[in-house]
Amino acid sequence: VETILHVKPSTDFAWPVDGAIDPSIVDVATSAGAHKVIARSDSLQETGGLPYTPTAARPIGGGTTAVVSDARLSTAFQGNMSTAGNSTLAVQKFLALTLALTEQDTDTERSIVVAPQRMPTVAQAQSMAAALHALDDERWTQPLGLVDAAEAKPDADATTGVPGSSQYPKKLRSQELPTQAFQDIKSTQVSLNDFQVILTHPERVVTPFGNAINRSMSTSWRGSPLKAQQYRDSVRTYLQGLVNEVQLISKSDVTLSGRSATIPVTVQNRLLQGVDHLVLRLKSENATRLKLNNGGAVAEQPIRIAGGHSQSVKFDADANVNGQVQMTAQLYTEDGTPYGEEMTFTVKVSELTPTVLLVIAGGLLLLVLAGIRMYTHRKRANAGGAAGDNGSGPEQPSDPTPDTGPESGAPSGPGEKVER
């Protein structure tokens, strides 16, 4: 507003649709920080029998001021103002009404507020401008700002009672946002609150999405429920897409090499800014079989990752019994709120890893091959020796020496000595 209109905006006003109010609307306005509510004279009607239209400002309790706009002046430029006849008639009607208000009580100066439609067409805006310029000579009116009109002294006899809920227009009630819409808006706000605590530059996200959430509650969506839902869904989907940029990388099953090992878990940040104040929690579903860092079932480590990077977090693990253990990894904010989806994987505990088993199997295979080679070599050697003696038969003495020993009974030959 300051950049385009060069006017400092006042944020102390609440403007209900068509200026219709009831106690709940006033409560919502004041809870949002507004101390002034722009109502309309057909909602806050005069019941005191005043012969003139009172000053717009009047207290309605609790330190809140109702700034009551004139219903006839505020609706003078509705309809099709693109034709000259309609535009001229609206301008003349507006001028006649302002003169009639002045003539109601010429001795009392009053502040009259005009609150036209929220989204006028170009033709409607041009018609309003023509009517206001026709009063530039200040013949019976003087221009006054809204802030000054809200601070004017109220008429003592003006109506200050807020109408009950039953008097709220049924047409406007049927156009209100449904309960589900506010539940969706609340869910988006909760997601934004959980997301901003991990960002190193939260203002890049909080400001645009905060404005978008405010827009989703605007009365401008009245009469367009489908478009309103599409807008809310698009805001929620866009935010969820950013939230999912920080996530755990899925991993396959892990096999521990021996009784002690390290289990890595990877966290990815695909945002354009860093994340901090995150905690990665790893849980063993069977602490008797597999214990983590501190000898328990759960281990935690803080997470801090620059934009567009990943970080591998390692947890020490000690196994007591062979078998499979289910593991669960989950990110949390520092206040203990879960962030993103949890990831599960299985750890297989075994003293002999597949690599070790492969080496042992390879060694056994080499031993078997060596034994086969030795057997084959010996068999060939034996077969070669048998082939060399073929045809001569076994060696036998051709002339056996007769037994001439003393126990044979034959005499000894000459010159032979007999050993006794």
Image (cartoon, rainbow, N blue to C red):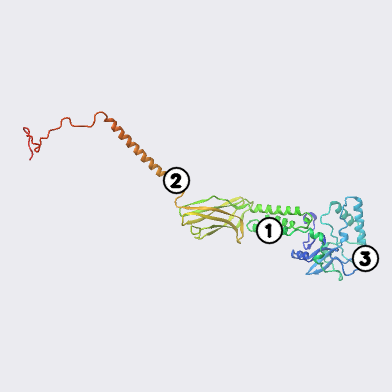
Q: Does the image show residue 353?
A: yes
Q: Which of marks 3 and 1 is nearer the N terminus?
A: 3
Crowding around mark 2 (Cα neighbors within 10 Å: few <14, some 14 to 19, many 20+) is: few
Residue indicated by mark 2? 358
Residue 19 in percent (x, y) is at 82, 61
For label 3, the residue is 104
Identify the secondary structure beneath mark 3: helix
Residue at image location 68% in from the left, 52% down from the top: 237
Residue toward you, 376 or 328: 376
State the residue position of label 1.
187
Is residue 17 visible in the rendered image? The answer is: no
User: Element under label 2?
Assistant: helix
Disc 3 or disc 1, which is closer to the eye?
1
Question: Mark 3: few, some, or many residues within 10 Å (few <14, many ≥20)?
Answer: few
In the drawing, does residue 246 fall left or right of residue 401?
right
Q: Which of 138 and 200 is in front in this view?
A: 200
Q: Distance between the residues labelled 2 and 3?
A: 106 Å
Residue 263 appears left or right of 32: left
Q: Which amino acid does label 1 sit on?
A: Ser
| C-beta proximity under 8 Å, tags 2 and 3 | no
Which badge, 1 or 2, is on the more N-terminal residue? 1
The three-letter code of the residue at mark 2 reads Leu
The residue type indicated by label 3 comes to Gln
User: Cα distance, mark 1 to mark 2?
Assistant: 54 Å
User: Residue drawn at (92%, 54%), measured in percent from left and top?
Assistant: 89
